[in-house]
Image: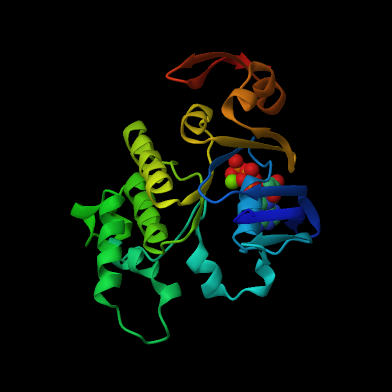
């Protein structure tokens, strides 16, 4: 049985349908990228999967149970979601932001245990922010701030992480570092990762499955050999490209727009 799935999902805003008839299932331990042009519905899909918005039609299932029937803590213990442009008060220090990740495990007014503190320390460290742990997030660079949010999602210790453009603002070194961290958690801890990525070469390198959305519908779903082809990139993104392969990884070299 798949860990997370959706069936005939339709969703939108103010009566306008944005995603149409999407049915997908995500196996436990998979690492999946969602790609597609701006406005194709990637964030909307992720928000539906994490129950941040309610679909107009269709259902989302977590471990076979409809998420509309689950309480918020139960969802948060299973699904961590990093939004595309998260916001928080500027004066909150990194380790306090990360500590919010523990909320789904706490009863109201219950205090932090030693284990909670260890998990928060691990998450801050894993996100590469040991030396910035007391720094207010308003004083971090864009990339450091992004990593502080990743620390919060990790502290939540979910089974599934839904990440909307987790590498935005990151330089190439930190993009690799975050994706390698997610890959390590995926391999060693069985974390299921579904992430929206714009960089097709990184998506191809770091995910076993790629799903392309176009105009709110699933246009492609397969491994990188099947998805990253010159024809597909032309059809989906209207770019001309040449595909090469090295290290068992497909790389697109863009040569122009259609
Ligand atoms: N809160 C909202 N209210 C109204 N319309 C919205 C809202 N959020 C998104 N939309 C619209 O829904 C469509 C899909 O948006 P979505 O954010 O899902 O796209 P996306 O594929 O994530 O794009 P991007 O690559 O730019 O992040 C867009 O046309 C957008 O204008
Ligand atoms: Mg988006």
The mark tally for this picture is 0
Residue found at the very far bottom of the displayed protein: 109
Q: Is 232 above or below relative to 56?
A: above
The residue at 27%/48% (across/down) is 128
Quadrant (top left, top right, bottom left, bottom right) of the N terminus: bottom right
- The answer to which of 197 and 58 lies nearer the viewer is 58
Q: Quadrant of residue 152?
A: bottom left
The residue at 54%/51% (across/down) is 28
Q: Quadrant of residue 95?
A: bottom left
Q: In the image, 127: left or right of 186?
A: left
- The answer to which of 49 and 236 lies nearer the viewer is 49
Q: In the image, 45: left or right of 200?
A: right
Q: Residue 116: percent from the left, percent from the top?
A: 30, 71
Q: In the image, 40: left or right of 245?
A: right
Residue found at the very far front of the displayed protein: 1
Q: Residue 139: percent from the left, percent from the top?
A: 28, 55
The residue at 51%/31% (across/down) is 199
Is residue 93 visible to us here? Answer: no
Is residue 230 visible to us here? Answer: yes
- The answer to which of 136 and 5 lies nearer the viewer is 5
Quadrant (top left, top right, bottom left, bottom right) of the C terminus: top right
Q: Quadrant of residue 226?
A: top right
Q: Residue 142: percent from the left, percent from the top?
A: 36, 46
The residue at 41%/64% (across/down) is 156
């Amino acid at each position: 049985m798949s860990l997370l799935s959706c069936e005939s999902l339709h969703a939108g805003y103010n009566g306008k349908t944005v995603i149409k008839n999407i049915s997908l299932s995500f196996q436990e331990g998979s690492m999946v990228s969602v790609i597609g042009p701006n406005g194709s519905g990637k964030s909307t899909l992720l928000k539906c999967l994490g129950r941040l918005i309610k679909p107009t039609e269709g259902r989302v299932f977590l471990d076979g149970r409809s998420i509309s029937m689950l309480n918020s803590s139960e969802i948060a213990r299973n699904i961590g979601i990093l939004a595309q442009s998260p916001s928080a008060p500027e004066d909150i220090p990194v380790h306090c932001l990360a500590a919010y990740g523990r909320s789904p495990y706490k009863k109201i007014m219950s205090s932090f245990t030693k284990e909670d503190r260890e998990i928060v320390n691990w998450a801050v460290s894993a996100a590469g922010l040991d030396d910035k742990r007391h720094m207010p997030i308003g004083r971090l660079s864009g990339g450091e701030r992004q990593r502080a949010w990743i620390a919060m999602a990790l502290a939540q210790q979910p089974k599934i992480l839904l990440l909307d453009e987790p590498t935005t603002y990151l330089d190439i070194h930190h993009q690799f570092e975050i994706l390698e961290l997610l890959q390590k958690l995926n391999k060693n801890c069985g974390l299921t990762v579904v992430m929206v990525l714009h960089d097709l070469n990184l998506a191809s390198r770091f995910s076993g499955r790629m799903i392309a959305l176009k105009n709110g519908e699933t246009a492609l779903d397969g491994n990188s050999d099947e998805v990253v082809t010159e024809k597909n990139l032309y059809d989906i993104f209207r770019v001309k490209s040449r595909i090469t392969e090295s290290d068992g990884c497909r790389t697109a070299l863009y040569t122009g727009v259609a």
